[in-house]
Amino acid sequence: MLPVSNVVDFWFDPICPWCWITSRWIGEVEKVRDIEVRWHVFSLATINEGRELEPSYRKFMDNTWGPARVAQAVAEQYPEQLKHFYDVLGNEIHHRENTSPGDKYLPAIEQALASAGLPAELLERALNDESAPGLATSIAAAQELVGNDVGVPIIAFNGVGFFGPVISPSPAGEEAGKLFDAAVTLAHYPGFFELKRTRTVGPIFHGEDQK
């Protein structure tokens, strides 16, 4: 018998394509399993600040502050809109590729705020560190569950957390439900820590998603 897991906490950084795919999977799981998903913001730029990185990845990280900062602002001021904002921002970034080198995702954020019916002035949070305390708290909560050597996605089933699953593409329907059942089973075994293999495909996105 599978462990009962009704509450799923999901930490995301809007710029991560793997996290985006996993979030689409958990959306499918909601259709076939009795779960409540609670969304939290993570920032890869924050956890990589001060670290020695490959120059190309450092350049990429330096341009990725904005989406997480604005998502945190939405979480603080309009929490009921956080998932919708993530959905439309993810579409802009991952499907419409509304970004170009050096634009710091500002056009994508601006469009996502408009599409989600959120105040345009929230865009200002992308360019300052007002979101830093909230992001730090959210990241700390995730790292308390899984440690500080992972990125996103981070998922917790009734408080039992882990990094992943990293999947491509995301399954749908009952196939999504079966993967969820397996993940819950592994997560609730006290001695389970890691299951991994080399990725042989990149992020595979289905069509534009407005869940």
Image (cartoon, helix red, strand yellow):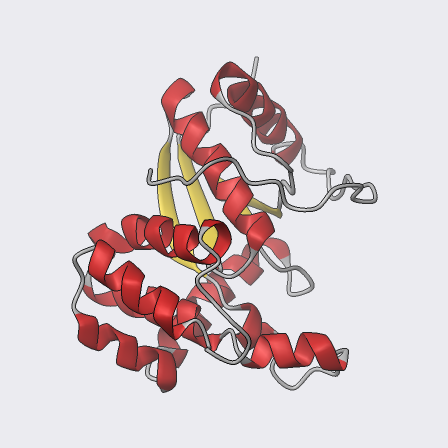
Which residue is found at the position 53% from the left and 24% from the top?
Answer: 176
Q: Nearer the viewer, residue 185 or 96?
A: 96
Name the image quarter holding the N terminus: top right
Quadrant of the snapshot with the C terminus: top left
Q: Is residue 52 left or right of residue 79?
A: right
On screen, residue 176 above or below 27: above
Mark yes or no: residue 80 visible: yes
Image coords of residue 143 (percent x, y): 57, 61
Q: Is residue 111 above or below residue 134?
A: above
Residue 164 at what x, y percent from top left? 62, 44
* Quadrant of res 112: bottom left
Q: Which residue is drawn at 80% across and 41% down?
A: 200
Q: In this view, does 26 lie above or below 55?
A: above
Of 79 and 138, the residue lying toward us:
79
Is residue 135 depicted above or below 33 in this figure? Answer: below
Q: Residue at x 77, y 78 (%)?
A: 54
Measured as percent of width and height from the top left, residue 207 is found at: 46, 36
